[in-house]
Structures are given as structure tokens and as C-alpha cells.
Amino acid sequence: MDDEAVVAATRQWIEKAVIGLNLCPFAKAVYVKNQVRYVVSRAPHLDGLLEDLDRELDFLAAADPDEIDTTLLIHPTLLSDFLDFNDFMQLAEAAVGEHGLDGVIQIASFHPHFQFEGTDVDDIGNYTNRAPYPTLHLLREASIERAVAAFPEAETIYERNIETLKTLGHAGWAALWATPPRA
């Protein structure tokens, strides 16, 4: 799959799940303003992916938030096992600190086999964090703070998302993907 197809599948996930199901009430504003940066990593190993992450942390920190507010670092082939991906997240979080960006940028994780601790693999609630490919979402904390201030009861988003997916069910989730991504 080429980079354009990877980005197209990721955009479809954002449009149909993240925005379409309102899993993140903050996503639509930056998405429609084209403030989301998509970076497909083709690093052959974890060290290369960490180097890509280093570059993206520096890039996002230096970028004008009105131009680029957030970055999705996507790797379509590395870290296909969720437990390996989850372990890698410790290195990713450490990289934020190594760049002096604690309190400035945070990373959210998404994976095709995402599984919350204490849940079954097929628990529909896990789908709140299931993306087409292993994805690191680099977010500006200032943007999160503004969004949370504007959204009453932001702490309830997680529970509301699980309820949304329970109502949708596995069949409803599968139906979201009945049409292929736009190129």
C-alpha cells in the first residue's frame, strides 16, 4: 500500500469514526481547517520510527498552530502486534520529555488491535482507539486545554464513546467500512 492509500484510509477513519461518530468532539475543527499533518513512516525498525518521531516532535513544536495543529505519525507495517506497540509507547512518551516538550505536546495512541486493559479482545469499547494502522497522534496541550474549556464535561467523553459503540455494535462498526477510502 502506498503512502497516499495509507493516508486515505486514515482520513476515512477520521471522517467516519472519529468525526462521524463524534468520538472526539475536538477533531472536526482542526480537520476541516486542514490543520492535521499526516506522516507515513516507512522506517524498517523501531530506531528509525523513533527518529521519525523525533523529527515530528520538533516540527510540530516549531510549526504555527494556525497552520498545523496536530500530527498523525502512521506506520502501516511496523508494530502490528498491539502489545509491542503498547511497549513502544513508553519510548514515544520518553521522547516527548527528551525534547523538552512535557506539558507542550502529548501523544495519543491508536492501533488496529487496540485493547484497553481488563477488556476482551473483541470488546466493542476497544474500537474507540482502533485506527487502520498503528498511529501516534501528536497533540498540542494548549489546543487540548482550549477544547476542553469549550466542551462541558469533557471527562465524560470516554464513557460516552463506549456507549456509542455499544449501541452501534460490531455489525454497525463493520458497516462503516463498506465503502473503500477515497484516494
Image (cartoon, rainbow, N blue to C red):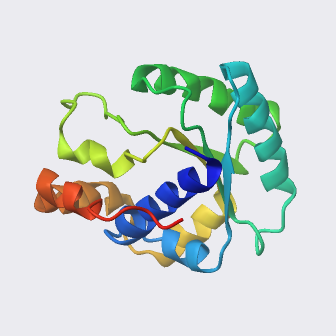
Task: Please state if 181 lies on the left or on the right of 31 as rendered.
Answer: left
Q: Eyeballing the image, is 126 above or below 50?
A: below
Q: How many marks?
A: 0
37 with respect to 12 (left or right) = right
Q: Can you give x and y, in whole percent of width and height, for residue 114 in the image?
A: 36, 36
Asked where in the image residue 151 lies, by quadrant, the reply is bottom left
Screen quadrant of the N terminus: top right
Query: Can residue 69 be seen here?
Result: yes
- Check the image and name the residue furthest to the right: 62
Q: Quadrant of the C terminus?
A: bottom right
Q: Nearer the viewer, residue 45 or 162?
A: 45
Res. 169 image quadrant: bottom left
42 and 90: which is toward the camera: 42
Which one is in front, 169 or 181? 181
The residue located at (46%, 27%) in the rendering is 80
- Position of residue 34 relative to residue 108, above or below, is below
- Quadrant of residue 46 within the rendered picture: top right
Looking at the picture, how far across and down is residue 129, in whole percent?
38, 47
Query: Taking 97 as reference, is 40 above or below it?
Result: below
77 or 100, nearer to the observer:
77
x%, y% of residue 133?
Answer: 48, 42
Does residue 23 appear in this view? Answer: no
Q: Residue at x 23, y 28 (%)?
A: 118
Image x and y of residue 89, in percent? 56, 29
> In the image, 119: left or right of 147?
left
| Point 64% across, 32% down: residue | 93
> Does residue 145 appear left or right of residue 53 in this picture?
left
